[in-house]
Amino acid sequence: MFFFSESDLPGIGKKINCGTHSNEKAVIILHHDGKRELYIMNKDNEPMAGISLLDEEARRFGAFLSGSVFKPKALENLETAMEGIRIDWFKLESDSPVIGKRLGGLGIRKKTQLSIIAILKGETFIPNPSSDYIFQEGDTCVVIGKPEKFNDFLSIIRKDSHGT
């Protein structure tokens, strides 16, 4: 049987203890600055191995683990339904031209054929933000659509409008 438990690490972030169906254990440390640490624990709850990941690395790593990049055969029907669709996260930097603007006034869906399905604001999760939502520095936009359209989205949210 698998389990997950969370605890706060004051001044650092969160600690997540994970146990698997085969009684293997892992610990994930989520730092406030986006850094992640993953430790594989031995039977005495001591780290046997560990890696440190930056925010973007952790998200990509998680995408592989979740099957959004490669789906096992058992998920073939879901893969067919989602073929050509990707979900990605984009954090708004301090110089983003959308900061202080309403989501509805930007025409993102019309210009990019993408949808913002959620906003992550620190530890707050805002699903399906309304058109009245006003972007703030540090917001992370969870976006869904065709991968080739993500550069169009970047050109809207980044100061250097080249999508890089």
Image (cartoon, helix red, strand yellow):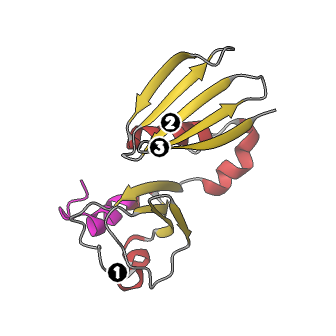
Marks 2 and 3, how far apart in space?
Answer: 14 Å
Position of residue 79 in the picture relative to residue 145 (left or right): right
Magenta region includes residue 157:
yes
Query: Which quarter of the picture shows residue 163?
Result: bottom left
Q: Which dot marks residue 29? A: 2
Q: Which dot marks residue 59? A: 3
Q: Which dot marks residue 106? A: 1
Position of residue 136 in the picture relative to residue 87 (left or right): left
Q: Is residue 131 above or below residue 119?
A: below
Q: SS at mark 3? A: helix
Q: Which residues are magenta?
A: 150-164
Magenta region includes residue 54:
no
Residue 69 at x, y = what percent? Answer: 54, 42
Q: Which dot marks residue 14? A: none
User: What amino acid type is highlighted by mark number 3?
Assistant: Arg
Image point (46%, 39%), residue name: 58
Query: Which quarter of the picture shows residue 74?
Result: top right
Residue 66 at x, y = what percent? Answer: 61, 41
